[in-house]
Image (cartoon, rainbow, N blue to C red):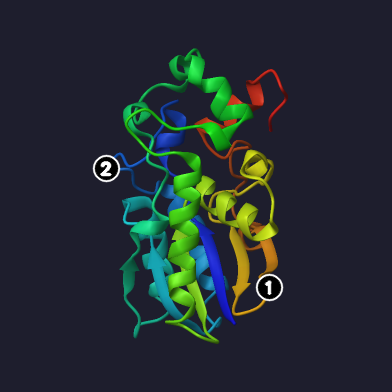
Amino acid sequence: MTEFLLIRHATNDWVNTGRLAGWTPGVHLNEDGTAQAAALADSLAKARIAAIYSSPLERTMETAQAIAAHYPALSVQALEGVGEVRYGKWQGEKLSRLRREPRWEIIQVYPSRAHFPGGEAIRQAQARAVDALESLVGRHPNQRVAIVSHSDIIKLIVAHYLGAHVDFFQRIEISPASLTIIALGTGRPYIIRVNDTSYLASLRPAPRHSGPWERLKRRFSLGWR
């Protein structure tokens, strides 16, 4: 089986802007995020990682580079399939405005029906992320592979391999710089670990929220975390 270490990028300052980052260029790790990435990388230094892949965005590539520093024989390979959800016209917009959109409630309650204007559907994002992982199984049999991605993408991957309906994917918590482990092969998938941040215990506490998207969901009337 191939063991995938699914890692969410570390913290950045964009989460405090109240805007939906998406594929916005120039979103880098902040000081806390750099420390998180270093702690994560230290914890994986002896993990015998065979390959490192990352979403092409800066915040993920920077997190991946911290891991690669412990593996001088490896270079970080960009993997488009695990890039952030393409939010289309919503990218860069204030979430305080977006939640007044009629489409907002559909996205929150029935994401399986959601298609971001000018962007992609949630189901499309899930399908391409799963395809990206499964394309790597044959390339890395019986190896451990690190993939740095984004909160919603990792949630969608976990939901798929749990056999959970996509409408329930936001019930999964994926924190900044967290580690989720899934093993894939010819038989059933195995979800070994989800949202592990134990290696960050020595750092200053991260903000309670995972990002502006999650912060607004906690304010949503249905009681989202």
Front tag of 2 and 1: 1
- The residue most toward the left is 25
Between 31 and 60, the residue placed more toward the observer is: 60
Q: Residues within 10 Å of mark 1 (few under 14, many from 20)?
A: few
Q: Residue at x 32, y 70 (%)?
A: 77
* Residue 175 x/y as whole percent: 59, 48
Left of 118 or right of it: where is 4?
Answer: right
Left of 89 or right of it: where is 113?
Answer: right
**Callout 2 secondary element:** loop
* Residue 90 x/y as whole percent: 37, 27
Reply above or below: 211 against 83.
above
Answer yes or no: is residue 150 visible: yes
Between 156 and 121, the residue placed more toward the observer is: 121
On the image, numbered disc 1 is attached to which residue?
188
Reply above or below: 107 against 179.
above
* Residue 118 x/y as whole percent: 32, 31
**Callout 1 secondary element:** loop
Residue type (three-letter) at the residue carrying disc 2: Pro
Asked whether the residues under the numbered discs 2 and 1 touch, taking CB atoms below 8 Å apart as contact, a structural biologist would say no
On the image, numbered disc 2 is attached to which residue?
25
Dividing the picture into quarters, in which one does residue 4 lie?
bottom right
